Amino acid sequence: MQIVETTNEGLKRAYTVTIPATEISARIEGEVKRIAPTMKMPGFRPGKVPANLVKKMHGPALHQEALQTSIKEAMDKLVADNALRPAMQPDVSLGEGYEEGKDAELSVSLEVLPKIEAPAIDGLKLEKLTVPVADEAVDEQVQKFAEQQKSYEAAEGRAAEDGDQVICDFVGKLNGEEFEGGKAEQQAIVIGSGRLIPGFEEQLIGAKAGEERTITVTFPEDYPAANLKGQDATFDITVHEVKVPAETKIDDEFAKQLGLEGLDQLKGLLRGQLESETEGLTRTQMKRQLLDQLAAGHDFAVPPTMVEAEFEQIWQQLQQEAAREEDPEAAIAEIEAEKEDYRKIAERRVRLGLLLSEIGQSNGVEVSAQEMQMLLQQAAQQYRPEDRQRFVEYVRQDPMAAAQLRAPLYEDKVVDFLIEKADVTEREVTREELQAAIEADADETTSDAKPKKAAAKKAKKADATDEAEADAEPKKAPAKKKAAEPAAAEAETEADAEAKPAAKKAPAKKKAEAADEGDAAEAEAKPAKKTPAKKAATTED
């Protein structure tokens, strides 16, 4: 095998690798000898099939397998002999005109990781901003939680008012004809909830049990169902019952209805949620400080392919968020104008990732086999059941894929290691002050690049290894210990949690802003469930 270096510029390397035809042929012959004794063919005793017939039957497949094995071994030798640390999977191409019996000439190009001297970790100074959870904050969360558990009680002879719940049947018609998904029975609608298209709920005001009425509504121009966009439709409504909000008394009995022991336990669980949220924000704030210090003290060349891959991830996220804005074209134009700023962010992320990796290796930080197995199993759950084992085997056989899977956890462990080694001073602040400090750090990180849209802010605030810190208000009963967790704790918090016909989602912009607060990737409310009969008339978006 002959290896010739053709390019050595910065982090770029290129080689010509020649694999002799004799080496490939020898590998084929060896495989023929291995499988011939196991082959069966009419007219020959088992194991006595001639080698030339084995080649005739399986020659192309054997040649392809031998070629691929030879190329893999050649790449392993290339990397080992030249002490290369590939930044990404090398680009390998087989010369044109190659055919069996000829030498295989490979063109190999790749980028290598830069040589980085692990920095001294002494002298790191960090300020830890902590938010004590006051009793008032817990009481406020209890109150909000109770409001989300709102129940309704019958009101004899009452005309429906704003805030009341109306139980009714309805049939939607377009030009006098019923349309698919516009019909429901015993539907619970809360007037003023904003779950239905504009004008629907308001026209239920004044309705009484036993009354029948017909209302007219106009579907929004951006309604998902094409046949309903901008159309005027009527709904024939039969009111069965009008209910009024029942007073929710916050006491031990209220907590017991949730499967808890009492009010103190509910408060304790909500306090734990608040503490977990603020601890997550505190860690984000400390990580930002740490990464800023590391970034300020190191400036080295990074592989362009890694930067481009990181940039593509950022760009896809931005485009997805922009597409959900009220004015997608304007949002996309805005991020396009700041494209180079995002590329600089990608470069910073890559540089910090490499730096953290070097620090971790120099200080013995490791991801254990057990931790890696957990990562692998979690990642496999994203695939269909029949594909999960193939994914696991692929990651186990591909070092590059395994490294990509391991990287986020490894970087987090390095960050935790550095925080433990740092000189940390603590200062109590309010939650608002803590969030303001995080945003200020993000703005400094991205220099002059300050997108106005929430989607853009979200990406810019993310550092090399920022994790999503959930900051959503609790919408479900707090989790108890698993052994005693009540079914009610996982139920929807409103009696009418099921999606309503002509219901609408929160505007995309509001969702993005909610997710942006504290970098909460999962702050969006879960979409309400639908039944097949309601499909066409649900969810204005």
Image: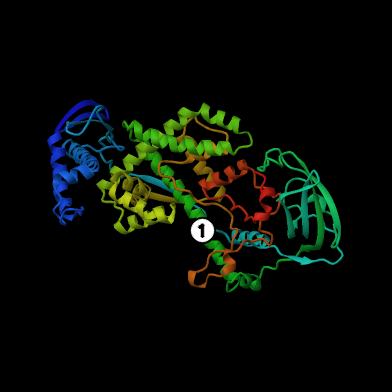
- In percent of width and height, residue 498 lies at 66, 58
In this rendering, does residue 206 appear at all?
A: no
In this rendering, does residue 118 appear at all?
A: yes
At mark 1, the secondary structure is helix
Alpha-carbon neighbours of circle 1 within 10 Å: few (<14), some, or many (≥20)?
some
405 or 136, which lies in front? 405
Identify the coloring.
Answer: rainbow
- In percent of width and height, residue 124 lies at 35, 44
Q: Residue at the location (35% across, 47% down)?
A: 407
For disc 1, the marked residue is: 275
Residue 271 lies in quadrant: bottom right
Q: Residue furthest front?
A: 43
User: Is 92 displayed left or right of 217 in the figure?
Assistant: left
User: Is 215 displayed left or right of 430 in the figure?
Assistant: right
User: Is 202 displayed left or right of 469 in the figure?
Assistant: right
Q: Please, is residue 107 above or below residue 528 in the view?
A: above
Q: Amino acid at mark 1?
A: Glu
- Say which quadrant the N terminus sits in: top left
Q: Please, is residue 349 above or below residue 503 in the view?
A: above
User: Is 471 displayed left or right of 537 in the figure?
Assistant: left
- Say which quadrant the C terminus sits in: top right
